[in-house]
Image: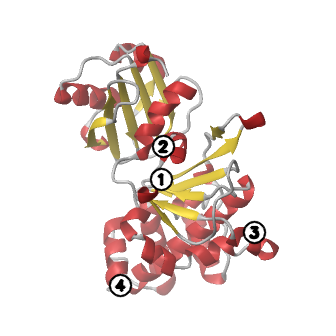
Amino acid sequence: MSESSYPRLLGDVGGTNARFAWQAAPGQLIESVCTYPCKDYVSLLAALQHYLKEQGKPVPHSCSIGIATPLVGDEVKMTNHHWSFSISALERALGVKRLLVINDFTALALSLPSLPAEDLVQVGGGAPKAGAPVALLGPGTGLGVSGLLPAPRGGGLVPIMGEGGHVTLSPTNDREEAVTRALRDRFGHASAERALSGPGLVNLYQALCGLDGANASLSTAAEVSDSAIGGSNTQAVESLALFLSMLGTVAGNLALSLGALGGVYVGGGILPRLGGDRIARSGFRAAFEQKGRYRDYMAAIPVYVIVAKQSPALAGASRALDEL
């Protein structure tokens, strides 16, 4: 950790909101955290410049951004928002010595080892196995997926940068199969993100209304979620139940793929608002463990819902400057 890489401008950019923060020196708290709706700015550069001006900050030495999109080469185009940019051009326009752009869930994964216990709610399972792989996923505007894998010879944990939110959705019963078929007919490919995200919750609700011959009167994830929690709409109630059980299936698939005996962490903007008790009462954990001969293996794996008030991905973005 070099003092010459400070101060740092940090970002956690999703399809709906961009969160920016400042870190003045090594070991200093992350401060001046602000959240801006992405739709209010023509570009990421405009949002970053607005933050610096509003907070009265100088041009930082370094900038690290976790962003919700695949990253291949210099050109970046967001999946669930219209922003696109060249990393090298953005670095020049900001005037920073170093600009690091990584996937937002890679940044979140880097924060997991330092998350305090009060920022986590455990949903089933036992104790994590030290040094074992860790899985991470989270529904928000999209479905983020990452994890941490142990490096050889005790070299710590290495973050994954992938696009696991776009794996094919796997139904486990007739009702899920009918809903998945409706999503496949509508979108061509029924990815996990088509069901397990804010827009995905609405997609589930609309699919259920179509299957039941009901009027789809709700149009936003907040409306569906509120109606489900309040019990005022039959299809909304079922859509949230399906959402949680299907998320459990996808989380279990990820845990099996990575051998995530170090635990499965669930972030994103949706589950923390539901609360650990509601998730624990849902079909999430049963679907997570429903892996046939590997049920006992799955039952031992702890799942943690991240309930931190400040985006942990900001700390992960700072750590990325030291490790990536």
Secondary structure type for disc 1: loop
The answer for how far apart the CA atoms under marks 3 and 4 are is 37 Å
Q: Is residue 274 left or right of residue 115?
A: left
Q: Which residue is mark 2?
A: 79
Front residue of 97 and 301? 301
Please tell me whether residue 273 is drawn above or below residue 324 in the rendered image: below
Tell me the kind of residue under disc 1.
Answer: Gly
- Residue 31 in which image quadrant: top left
| Structural crowding at the residue carrying mark 4, measured as other residues with C-alpha within 10 Å and reported as few (<14), some (14–19) or many (≥20) | some
First reached walking from the N terminus: tag 3 or tag 1 = 1
Q: Which mark is residue 297?
A: 3
Across and down, in percent, residue 213 comes to 45, 85
Front label number (2 vs 3): 3
Query: Disc 1 designates what residue?
Result: 142
Secondary structure beneath dot 3 equals helix
Residue occupied by mark 4: 233
Q: Please name the amino acid that badge 2 sits on.
A: Thr
Q: Mark 2 vs mark 1: which is more N-terminal?
A: 2
